[in-house]
Image (cartoon, rainbow, N blue to C red):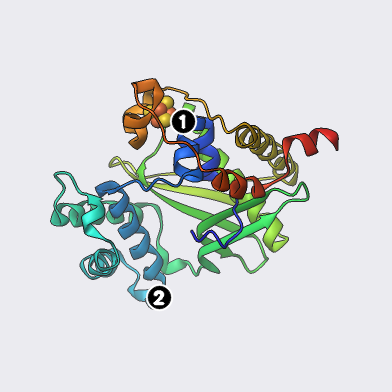
């Protein structure tokens, strides 16, 4: 993201902060680049196939025809990726393509795209809430029924979560609902995540209400004010969890004996523009 663009909070950056404030700082304030891995590239490939699938005439949107596009789509994804910066570990491109095809086969167990005509694909949405907080997101697909009812769809290439642990995914859907309502003046009737992985494709559905969108606007502001407190002090604490095993920053994390670099003041100043300052908010 270019620094000429105003900074904004996204579902993934808010989630990263809730997971670990230091991880948020290193990823979104310092913007230390993290190498892309095979799972990320596979996600990019599957999303691209599913996006481009809707350029096909409706009768051609069947599994055989769509899955046959994977090799060509891979060439395009690989061409625009610096493969030297990708850690494929022991996953060969052929294996990655095979896994992508498996995920697409799973997709066709959930939907028949011959019956669908999206009103939006890879839709960038951005708004500034009345509180002054700027939010941004990308929505994989939007459908608008003849009666105006809107459905928002997001593809997940991982496996569906245990139904006891869906809160982080519901968080994302609440964010999409608020973003869409604020940018299009229409509250989506339904938001859905399509989980394609784990050999057991599943749909997670959340039907938002205006009350919930208002409530979420307050909750996300509270999260921002927590972040803004750290930005003001320049101190982002560690928060260890099982997820540290997957954190790229372990080698510079104090919880694991490392030392993070000093955070550049201009980067803190830039990020502080996302929303209101904690002191200003307390006085209002
Ligand atoms: S290793 Fe764990 S505690 Fe350290 S920055 Fe990463 S998520 Fe935070």
Q: Is residue 57 above or below residue 174?
A: below
Q: Front-most of 90 and 258? A: 258
Q: Are circles 1 and 2 on residues that touch, CB within 8 Å?
A: no
Q: Which mark is residue 163?
A: 1
Residue 234 visible in the shown view = yes
Q: Position of residue 29 (x, y in %)?
A: 51, 44
Judge left or right: residue 174 versus residue 138. right
Q: Choose the circle earlier in sequence order: 1 or 2.
A: 2
Judge left or right: residue 186 versus residue 47. right
Taking the spot 29% from the left edge, 54% from the top edge, the residue there is: 41
Q: Which element is circle 1 on?
A: helix
Q: Which mark is residue 174?
A: none
Q: Position of residue 34 (x, y in %)?
A: 34, 46
Taking the spot 67% from the left edge, 65% from the top edge, the residue there is: 148
Mark 2 = which residue? Answer: 55
Judge left or right: residue 210 versus residue 205. right
Question: Distance between the Cα atoms at labels 1 and 2?
Answer: 34 Å
Q: Is residue 66 above or below residue 223?
A: below
């Amino acid at each position: 993201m270019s620094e000429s663009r105003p900074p904004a909070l996204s579902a993934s950056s808010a989630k990263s902060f809730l997971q670990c404030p230091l991880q948020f700082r290193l990823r979104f304030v310092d913007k230390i680049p993290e190498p892309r891995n095979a799972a990320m590239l596979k996600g990019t490939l599957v999303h691209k196939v599913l996006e481009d699938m809707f350029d096909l005439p409706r009768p051609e949107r069947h599994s055989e025809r769509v899955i046959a596009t994977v090799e060509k789509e891979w060439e395009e994804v690989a061409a625009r990726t610096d493969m030297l910066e990708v850690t494929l570990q022991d996953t060969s491109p052929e294996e990655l393509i095979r896994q992508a095809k498996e995920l697409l086969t799973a997709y066709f167990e959930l939907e028949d795209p011959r019956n669908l005509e999206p009103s939006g694909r890879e839709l960038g949405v951005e708004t500034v809430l009345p509180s002054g907080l700027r939010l941004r997101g990308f929505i994989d697909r939007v459908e608008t029924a003849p009666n105006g009812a809107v459905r928002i769809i997001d593809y997940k290439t991982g496996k569906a979560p245990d139904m006891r642990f869906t809160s982080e995914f519901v968080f994302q859907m609440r964010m999409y609902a608020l973003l869409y309502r604020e940018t299009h003046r229409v509250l989506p009737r339904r938001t859905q995540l399509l989980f394609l992985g784990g050999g057991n494709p599943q749909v997670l559905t959340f039907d938002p209400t205006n009350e919930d969108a208002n409530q979420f606007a307050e909750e996300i502001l509270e999260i921002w004010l927590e972040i803004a407190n750290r930005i003001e002090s320049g101190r982002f604490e560690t928060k260890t969890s099982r997820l540290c095993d997957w954190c790229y920053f372990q080698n510079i994390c104090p919880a694991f004996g490392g030392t993070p670099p000093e955070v550049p003041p201009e980067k803190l100043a830039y990020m502080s523009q996302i929303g209101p300052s904690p002191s200003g908010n307390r006085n209002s």
